[in-house]
Image (cartoon, rainbow, N blue to C red):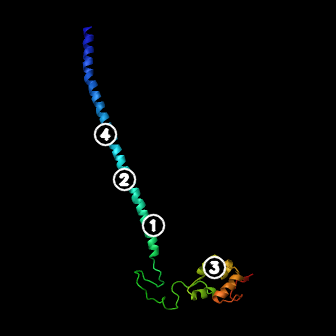
């Protein structure tokens, strides 16, 4: 019986410091957990503030980019003078001479020639009269793309450009 009591007391005394050490470790772990949670909350708040700042910066940059785009469109030169790559006036033959520079025109049709003489071309004429360019092109095209010009447009061209509304001018024909 004495042995039992002695061993029981020994076990109780031996386990008390262990309970205390375990409690101490548990308390330290709780403190570390609280510190970690506090640090995470602070870090999350800092990151949230930084993200808000970045979003404001992005909105400001978008606004500035839109303003710069609008300004750059307004600042484009409206001059028809030919310029070199370094924005100096160019003095080549295209400015005063009647010589064609670059690729030669594909067609010698009187409509295109007359428009070129007036510093225009069929695409601009088509846009000005709300006619698809492909339709206008087909009036003086050859081959499978050829199409007869409606009489109202032939007479309009005759009135505007002085080209006669005849079959000799419009080889693809004139429709009523």
Q: Which of marks 1 and 2 is nearer the N terminus?
A: 2
| Residue 96: percent from left, percent from top | 49, 91
Q: Please state which of the two labelled residues, at mark 4 or mark 1, is closer to the viewer.
A: 1
Q: Residues within 10 Å of mark 1 (few under 14, many from 20)?
A: few
CA–CA distance in space, label 2 to label 3: 56 Å
What residue does disc 3 label?
129
Q: Are marks 4 and 2 in contact (CB under 8 Å)?
A: no
Q: Residue at x 25, y 9 (%)?
A: 2
CA–CA distance in space, label 1 to label 3: 33 Å
Q: Earlier in the sequence, mark 2 or mark 3?
A: 2
Secondary element under disc 4, as helix, strand or loop, is: helix
Q: Which residue is drawn at 27% across and 21% down?
A: 15
Q: Earlier in the sequence, mark 4 or mark 1?
A: 4
CA–CA distance in space, label 1 to label 2: 24 Å
Secondary element under disc 3, as helix, strand or loop, is: loop
User: Which disc, if any, is residue 50?
Assistant: 2
Q: In this view, does 68 lie above or below 113?
A: above
Secondary element under disc 2, as helix, strand or loop, is: helix
| 29 lies left or right of 104 | left
Q: Earlier in the sequence, mark 4 or mark 3?
A: 4
What residue does disc 1 label?
66
| Residue 100: percent from left, percent from top | 53, 88
């Amino acid at each position: 019986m004495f042995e039992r009591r002695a061993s029981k007391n020994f076990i109780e005394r031996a386990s008390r410091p262990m309970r205390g050490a375990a409690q101490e470790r548990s308390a330290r772990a709780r403190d570390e957990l609280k510190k970690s949670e506090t640090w995470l909350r602070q870090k999350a708040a800092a990151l949230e503030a930084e993200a808000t700042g970045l979003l404001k910066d992005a909105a400001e940059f978008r606004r500035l980019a839109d303003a710069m785009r609008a300004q750059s469109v307004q600042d484009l030169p409206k001059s028809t003078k030919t310029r070199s790559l370094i924005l100096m006036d160019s003095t080549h033959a295209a400015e005063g001479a009647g010589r064609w520079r670059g690729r030669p025109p594909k067609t010698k049709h009187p409509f295109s020639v007359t428009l070129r003489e007036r510093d225009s071309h069929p695409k601009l004429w088509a846009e000005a009269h709300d006619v698809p360019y492909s339709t206008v092109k087909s009036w003086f095209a050859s081959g499978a793309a050829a199409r007869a010009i409606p009489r109202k447009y032939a007479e309009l061209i005759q009135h505007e450009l002085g080209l006669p509304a005849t079959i000799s001018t419009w080889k693809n024909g004139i429709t009523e």
